[in-house]
């Protein structure tokens, strides 16, 4: 088993070499891991990788990785022997070794490499290969195939990232992405078909069309998570979902005929590596790539000129992305987050409302979801009933001790755990907890927590919570809730629970949000005919279904004329008669135009 970092041997004294050795090590880690998971050791890896796979059983993993890399290194910084049958462990330790030996500044993917990559993809794009219907369909079909065939590998990658074995809902999520792919395959001909539009008398005789064209080389940057559930899920499933759903914008980019680079989130390295491997295995490498990494790699990518940048993440990084894009006038889609409110009237079916709120909060990645319920607003009178119903249903969903429930996700990392914990401990907040509030730091678990009327100036009410804390804000009458929502930046989603149609209409008309659910949470995102995106602080642009295709297309207006019917009305010399005819034509006054044509005026 690989064990520790002892520093490089004398023969390894160049940083770059070390870095490349580490990359080789990581690559082997990925290969071992995924091949073991899929029992597919015969694929078309380079021969040195296959050799590595064959000899794993009797070798020191590190020296094998290093020795089979292009650089003949000693096994200086990895020791002990591997346990052949436990390749997962090998992989885990490779990652541990990696984190020990790779300094953040030794990014393997720098500006130079990013420029080369974009250049390469632009050259391929310029050959026109991505424009054809056949290329697009074949890539989409390969994505569908990849999802079908590699389900198990993805499951394994998830396990590696988060040690979470619960994958029951995984299939459903995969099939969700697959259904996006199948929709694109089914509709692509229609989407690509030019749309004929009306012409006017000024261009008579003519025809006109809106023609979609690809933008060129596009960049997709993903977050680690993505909300999608109406059922209990755990962080592991969530991560997989993100990784798979980071494919969703790629489906749009490919459908629209672009070359594309995907930069998945570094927070889940095994799933990122898997995507990189699967993309190179299944998709056209000359036009579709995955770049793994964190801030340095993303920065290197953002320094390049792209034809569109599609970013999913927080508003802080969204601003960095937009500033970088502005230098090249690159259009952006920003899929951000925000504080999503749920306004609850007193005429609701209490049990159903409570269940759906719980689903949109704790059963949605324990609150770590961009369209999850961030806070609830209800009337002072109704709040106790609603809170009681929430407590009852929470118990039904997650049992007496939700910290032990496999259906309550853990917090993604200790940074976010501490952030949430300090939110709860803030002055004037800690005493507002009416349910939950328990934490287990070493397991990164926080129980579903309800608070009532926390101060408006607390970070819980000023920042996106992105965790299992649910503040309930009380108002005198339900309409006052509109003002609470409007006092904050526009959310990605807003929810209303009421049977009152008038209130429903007022909510839809008067509350601005990326999307809405009336008597429902989160589920609107599953409808492919609804655009999904934010407004204001929650984002720019939208995707899903045909909207994904349009997001990555330019709509080009084209006028068609023949050489017939060429009138000299528009040509100099300009005469009063021509002016009269043109004026009549432009105001659709056919009778006036005919008169003017024959030298008469309507008034004469
Ligand atoms: P994040 O903004 O921290 O990271 C997103 C991406 O940006 C990652 O790929 C990361 O590598 C990169 N990045 C991070 N810092 C960077 C920097 N300084 N320069 C350049 N690139 C950088 O977001 P996250 O923590 O991964 O996700 C949580 C946020 O994303 C929440 O606010 C959530 O609401 C939002 N989100 C939105 C959607 C949506 O569809 N609208 C979906 C999922 C998550």
Image (spheres, rainbow, N blue to C red):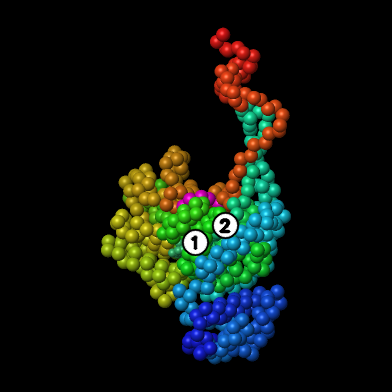
**Does the beta carbon of the residue at mark 2 sit less than 8 Å from ligand 1?**
no
Residue of label 2: 218
Q: Residue furthest left?
A: 427
Image coords of residue 234 (percent x, y): 51, 67
Please name whichever residue, 455 or 21, is drawn nearer the observer in this view of the structure.
21
**Element on which disc 1 rests:** loop
Residue name at image x 45 percent, y 40 percent: 509
Crowd band around label 1 with a 10 angstrom C-alpha radius: few (<14), some (14–19), many (20+)? some
**Quadrant in which the N terminus appears:** bottom right
Q: How far apart are marks 2 and 1 (CA)?
A: 13 Å
Residue name at image x 34 percent, y 62 percent: 434
Q: Is residue 586 above or below residue 267?
A: above
Please tell me in which quadrant of the rendered image residue 451 appears. bottom left
Residue name at image x 53 percent, y 57 percent: 305
**Does the beta carbon of the residue at mark 1 sit less than 8 Å from ligand 1?**
no
How many numbered marks does the figure carry?
2
Residue of label 1: 303
Magenta stretch: give its range: 539-543
Residue name at image x 64 percent, y 57 percent: 125
N-term-proximal mark, 2 vs 1: 2
């Amino acid at each position: 088993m690989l064990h520790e970092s002892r520093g490089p041997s004398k023969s390894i004294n160049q940083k770059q070499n070390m870095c490349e050795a580490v990359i080789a090590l990581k690559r082997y880690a990925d290969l071992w891991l995924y091949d073991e998971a899929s029992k597919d050791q015969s694929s078309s890896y380079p021969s040195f990788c296959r050799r590595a796979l064959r000899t794993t059983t009797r070798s020191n993993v590190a020296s094998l990785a290093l020795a089979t890399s292009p650089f003949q290194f000693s096994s200086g910084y990895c020791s002990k022997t591997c346990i052949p049958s436990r390749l997962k462990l090998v992989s885990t330790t490779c990652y541990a070794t990696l984190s020990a030996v790779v300094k953040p500044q030794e990014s393997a993917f720098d500006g130079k490499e990013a420029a080369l990559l974009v250049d390469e993809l632009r050259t391929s794009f310029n050959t026109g290969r991505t424009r054809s219907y056949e290329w697009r369909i074949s890539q989409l079909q390969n994505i569908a195939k990849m999802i079908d065939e590699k389900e198990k590998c993805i499951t394994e990658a998830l396990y590696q990232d988060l040690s979470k074995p619960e994958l029951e809902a995984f299939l459903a999520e995969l099939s969700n992405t697959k259904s996006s792919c199948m929709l694109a395959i089914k509709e692509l001909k229609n989407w690509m078909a030019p749309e004929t539009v009306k012409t006017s008398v000024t261009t008579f005789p003519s025809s006109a069309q809106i023609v979609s064209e690809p933008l060129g080389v596009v960049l997709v940057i993903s977050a680690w998570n993505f909300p999608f559930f109406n059922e209990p899920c755990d962080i592991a499933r969530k991560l997989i979902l993100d990784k798979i759903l980071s494919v969703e914008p790629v489906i749009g980019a490919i459908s629209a005929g672009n070359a594309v680079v995907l930069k998945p989130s570094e927070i889940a390295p095994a799933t990122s590596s898997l995507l990189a491997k699967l993309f190179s295995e299944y998709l056209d490498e000359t036009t579709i790539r995955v770049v793994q990494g964190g801030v340095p790699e993303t920065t290197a990518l953002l320094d390049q000129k792209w034809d569109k940048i599609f970013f999913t993440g927080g508003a802080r990084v969204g601003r960095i992305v937009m500033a970088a894009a502005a230098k090249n006038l690159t259009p952006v889609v920003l899929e951000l987050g925000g504080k999503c409110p749920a306004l609850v009237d007193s005429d609701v079916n209490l049990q159903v409302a409570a269940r759906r709120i719980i689903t949109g909060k704790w059963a949605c990645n324990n609150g770590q979801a961009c369209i999850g319920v961030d806070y609830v607003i209800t009337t002072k009178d109704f709040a106790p009933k609603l809170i009681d119903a929430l407590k009852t249903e929470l118990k039904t969903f997650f049992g007496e001790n939700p910290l032990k429930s496999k259906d309550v996700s853990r917090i993604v990392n200790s940074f976010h755990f501490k952030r949430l914990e300090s939110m709860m401990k803030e002055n004037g907040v800690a005493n507002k907890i009416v349910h939950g509030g328990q934490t287990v730091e070493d397991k990164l678990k926080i129980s579903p927590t309800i608070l009532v009327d926390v101060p408006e100036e607390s970070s819980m009410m000023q920042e996106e919570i992105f965790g299992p804390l649910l503040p309930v804000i009380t108002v005198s009458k339900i309409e006052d809730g509109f003002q609470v929502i409007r006092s904050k930046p526009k959310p990605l989603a807003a929810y209303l629970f009421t049977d009152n149609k008038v209130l429903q209409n007022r909510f839809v008309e008067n509350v601005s949000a990326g999307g809405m659910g009336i008597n429902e949470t989160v589920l609107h995102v599953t409808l492919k005919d609804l655009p999904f995106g934010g407004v204001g602080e929650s984002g720019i642009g939208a995707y899903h279904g045909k909207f994904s295709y349009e997001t990555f297309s330019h709509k080009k207006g084209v006028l068609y004329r023949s050489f017939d019917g060429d009138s000299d009305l528009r040509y100099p010399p300009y005469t009063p008669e021509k002016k009269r005819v043109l004026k009549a034509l432009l105001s659709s006054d056919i009778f006036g135009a005919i008169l003017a044509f024959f030298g008469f005026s309507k008034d004469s």
